[in-house]
Amino acid sequence: MEPVKNYINGKWVKAKSGKSFRSINPANKNEVVGVVPKSGREDIDQAVKAAREAYESWQLTPAPRRGEILFRAAEILLRKKESFGKLETREMGKILSEALGDVQEAIDMGYYMAGEGRRLSGETVPSELPNKDMKSVRVPMGVFGLITPWNFPVAIPAWKVFPALVCGNTVVFKPSSDTPVCAAKFVEVLAEAGLPKGVLNLVHGSGGEVGEYLVSHPGVDAISFTGSFDTGKHLEAICGAIHRMIVTEMGGKNAIIVMDDANLDLAVEGAIWGGFGTTGQRCTAASRIIVHKKAYKKFIERFKTAGSYLSIGNGLQRETDVGPVINESQFNKVLKYIEIGKKEGAKLILGGKAYRKGSCSKGYFIEPTIFGEVTPEMRIAQEEIFGPVVSAIKAEDLEDAIQIVNHTPYGLSSAIYTQNVNSSAIAERDLETGIVYINASTIGAEIHLPFGGIKHSGYGRKEAGGRGGALDTYSRWKVIYRDFSGQLQKAQIDK
Ligand code: NAD
């Protein structure tokens, strides 16, 4: 068991209240992974004060020097990848290979943002006037409050912390209370890499108390949040009222279209890993499979067979394909949705109950579940379940399939399996999601292109990289005009 602390102003400290809570292994409720400070407002006050003070010198630290610290952090993460992966599987439940992938994403983001320390480029453009020059430069926003979910407990903090720091911001980080140990280990890496005190502060605690106080704290300049739509929308309203910049990355009801000309081997495999990988707990999980009516019967048979081979268990065991869901409330929520699906008249094709064989009785395991004959209006086809439950919906043709995909409040990720170049081009144009995959599942973003959704899936600028990605989220533009003509202003106005 790990004793975990807050990290404030370069020191590992307990919560002022002295209270703590436990982080539990979802594969075995009896295993306590960490005992964690249950922080309150006074801990946030201290962390924000430290971040404000550190901002003065951090914003003036040359960006390439800031990048070097991130590079060292990526090197340390790489060295500790295996132990990070195992910890992540114990604390969050995902299978080890996926946990290692999550850590690798954080490593990649570290190297990538380290390089951005030497770029952070703006524009220089010619002036309309002689003897005048002009440019735009990126400047930091100040103190950033970062709030993260539990499903990518190392990668998502890395997606936020690395770009925030390279741009010259200081940070107060409030991770999910389901994965606090992973968050603390990640912060430890940055401390080891040589980050000056106060630049990155970590405060554990509940969203309602600690998170919400951080979001509205007068000493904070901007917020980046990833989590559910309900929480994100609530935080957007708080920030709107106090004129504070917020970026929210939220849920999804992602869909794969399988056309009648699709390579079914690829489509079935994509549906399996998109639907049941990470136990269906990815924001980009393929929870709807929309199948052309001519391919529907064959696809369902093969999807069912492939799903029935998935091995459920503790993610540390090599043979496991599907681990537990994160906690009791998520366990109950997923089972409730299965009941809703049955009541709505969907046809249960596979799974449909909790999985309690052997040692799995100690954890939050649910069978991979497939519903067929789902209609687009059903709740299981509209609401984010965030568990191993996939709905198959029959479509008349491509146009109908695209309409079904677009017919939810969410807009994060979608995919199409087809061998027809025209169908893929139409889908690429008409699917209303932030990310579209062609002949690949809805999952598997790469860090050097922007990541994020539209509609209820996201608000504001984007995460990750490329143009319009994280650098635009974690910096703002300052525009500078320099006049070396010696001319009076009036003469310039009369140009
Ligand atoms: P959640 O909204 O319950 O919590 C997310 C974070 O917000 C946690 O740290 C939580 O403590 C905090 N929080 C909760 N209430 C708060 C409040 N009132 N004020 C401030 N902070 C508060 O979400 P979750 O269950 O941790 O994560 C699952 C959700 O995250 C899913 O909807 C999933 O789709 C989404 N997600 C989205 C992305 C993306 O990039 N779009 C990535 C991963 C997860």
Image (tube, rainbow, N blue to C red):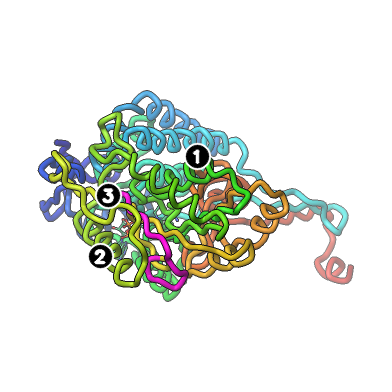
- Along the line of sight, which residue is nearer the eye, 382 or 171? 382
Quadrant into which the N terminus falls: top left
Q: Earlier in the sequence, mark 2 or mark 1?
A: 1
Residue at (60, 50) in percent of width and height: 138
Residue labelled with disc 2: 336
Residue at (37, 45) in percent of width and height: 307
At label 3, counting other C-alpha atoms closer than 10 Å, the crowd grade (few under 14, some 14-19, many 20 or more) is: many
Q: Amino acid at mark 2?
A: Lys
For residue 67, side relative to residue 78 (left or right): right
Residue 241 figure quarter = bottom left
Q: CA distance from mark 1 to mark 3?
A: 52 Å
Q: Position of residue 125 (x, y in %)?
A: 78, 51
Any part of residue 279 in sight? yes
Q: Is residue 212 magenta?
A: no
Residue 249 figure quarter = bottom left
Q: Amino acid at mark 3?
A: Glu
Contact flag, marks 1 and 3 (Cβ < 8 Å): no
Which SS class for mark 2? helix
Q: Position of residue 313 (x, y in %)?
A: 24, 39
Which label lies toward us, 1 or 3?
Answer: 3
Q: In the rendering, which numbered label is found on residue 367?
A: 3
Which label lies toward us, 2 or 1?
Answer: 2
**Residue 131 versus residue 90 in the image, above or below:** below
Q: Earlier in the sequence, mark 3 or mark 2?
A: 2
Q: In the rendering, which numbered label is found on residue 61?
A: 1
Q: In the rendering, which numbered label is found on residue 87?
A: none
Any part of residue 198 in sight? no
In the image, the segment drawn in magenta is 367-380
Q: Position of residue 137 (x, y in %)?
A: 64, 50
